[in-house]
Amino acid sequence: MIPLLSIVVPVYNVEPYITECLKSLAAQTLEDLEVILVDDGSVDGSRRVAEDFAASDDRFVLIGQRNRGPGPARNEGIRHARGAYLAFADSDDVVPPEAYELLVGKLAETGSDLACGAVGRLVDGELEESILHEKVFRRPELCTHITDKQVLIRDRTVWNKVYRRDFWERSGLAFPAGIYEDVPVAMQAHVLATSVDMLGEVVYHWRKRDAGETSITQRRAELANLNERLTAIRAVRAFLDDRAPELLDGFDALVLEKDIVFLFQALEHCEDPGPLLELSGGWLAELGPRVLAGAPSLRRLELHLLRRGLVAELRTVRQFRRAREDATRVRPRGWRTTNWYGDYPFFRDRRLRIPDEVFDARDELKLIARVEECEWTGTEYRLRAHASIHRVDRKVDKVALWLSDGQRRIPLETRRAGRYGVVATVDPGRLEGGGPSWRLQVRVETRGLVFKGWARDGDANSVWRFSVPGWSRTGMDITQ
């Protein structure tokens, strides 16, 4: 009987973890599946564990090959797959029980080519948010596409997904050799898909190993590993340049945010930086000039030092970044004309002569405004709000508040309360005749900076609303 779903699992020296992985696959609520285990030349007890599962559960199939790496192992498994849907799992990870039922169910419902979901990081037995996938699945959406939902550029793994088998074959998808084989395939699948389903549920537990051989991702600061990562980045950029050039800037920005950190880490700990500095030229050459120019100021400083081969200074900045909770603090400098610069090492250092524009952080500042309390005093409403500028550790000079219903703007009298607090009162009579819903607009000014925006709810990441469902002798009913 042909199974609905085929799960391909490459196996290589994962004896401490493989049992938990295979148990999680056997316990899936979607039972109509096959698990194709591809032993990639293991020399520990992994193959014996896989043989035991294949012997006890006829949904598990074991095949073997000489050690060729995870990409060829996955390709070999795909050749044996029979299901209408295709998924991948790494043999040291864990899949939650309902994951494949959720993913396959959405594909059956929508007709999309692939479905993907959120990822948890399994660290010392505890589940944390995967930093690699942060921000991706906070707003789930069905029948979307990476060119419309560009946050999917951050979704660069193959194992938090289910694919339609006919889509995979029609698109000619296959894993390259090398240790970052999944990144090019994940990006190609997102671009080539007609539509994609994004689920908010965690569908995969990605393990950080604490025993046995360290994983590929945990050896990411090794020179060979960095070379392989650069090869994968080049492959993705070449594909995007040909098929979806509008995604290049977003991909480059992600490389600059995430991947290049491993190059910095390698330079922090190496004895001979020469080969790494030579490699760094290739990394920088792959990134578009617009993305490099638009990098955050602290990252621009690291890149400046990297280009000049100033390894000792780069190490100082990296240590500064880790050691200071306020490492990205921004300060005003100048009297007649105020500019805003990152408060980092080597600013206006006479020896290094780093241009001021490397430290320029004006474009990185933004308003933080939120309503923390709204209460009825018996005659009026009292608002307590917070108003500050992100990354600026100083009280703003001026704060102004308005209530707006989209047609009218009602200015509020305010007084300061502490470093960042502001208090305002609202006379219900001033709102009479206005719309039932009002928002709080905030304007702050300090040293030449002016920001204006809507106040957020103090307990949620949404715009705060002052609702007026009806009038009574005591005033209004307030909801947020």
Image: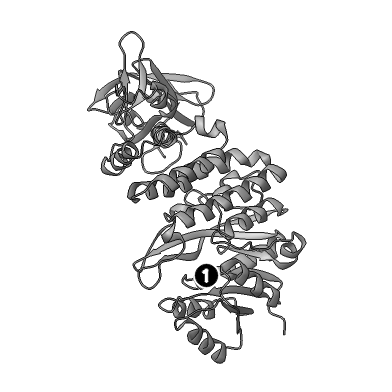
Q: Secondary structure at mark 1?
A: loop
Q: Which residue is at the front of the view, 223 or 254?
A: 223
Task: Identify whether 415 is placed above or below 32.
Answer: above
| 310 w.r.t. 167: above or below | above
Which residue is located at x 37 percent, y 15 percent?
448
Quarter of the picture holding the N terminus: bottom right
In the image, residue 279 lies at what x, y percent? 49, 46
Image coordinates of residue 208 in percent, x first then y, are: 40, 64
Residue 453 location, quadrant: top left
Q: Find disc 1 in the rendering and name its residue.
A: 90
Residue 249 lies left or right of residue 19; in this view the side is right
* Residue 435 locus on image (x, y percent): 51, 28
Residue 178, horizontal then vertical, whole percent: 57, 61
Of all residues shown, which one is farthest toward the bottom?
55
Q: Residue 39: which quarter of the image? A: bottom right
Rendered residue at 35%/14% (across/down): 338
Whether residue 312 can be seen here: yes
Q: Give the tally of numbered discs.
A: 1
- In front of the other: 243 or 410: 243
* Left or right of residue 431: residue 113: right
The extreme left residue here reads 418
Residue located 37% across and 43% down the image: 459
Quadrant of res 457:
top left
Identify the image's colour scheme: rainbow, by chain, secondary structure or one colour: one colour
Question: Depth check: 462 or 67 in front?
Answer: 67
Dot 1 crowding, Cα within 10 Å, few <14, some 14–19, many 20+: many
Quarter containing the C terminus? top left
The amino acid sitting under disc 1 is: Asp
Q: Is residue 143 visible?
A: no
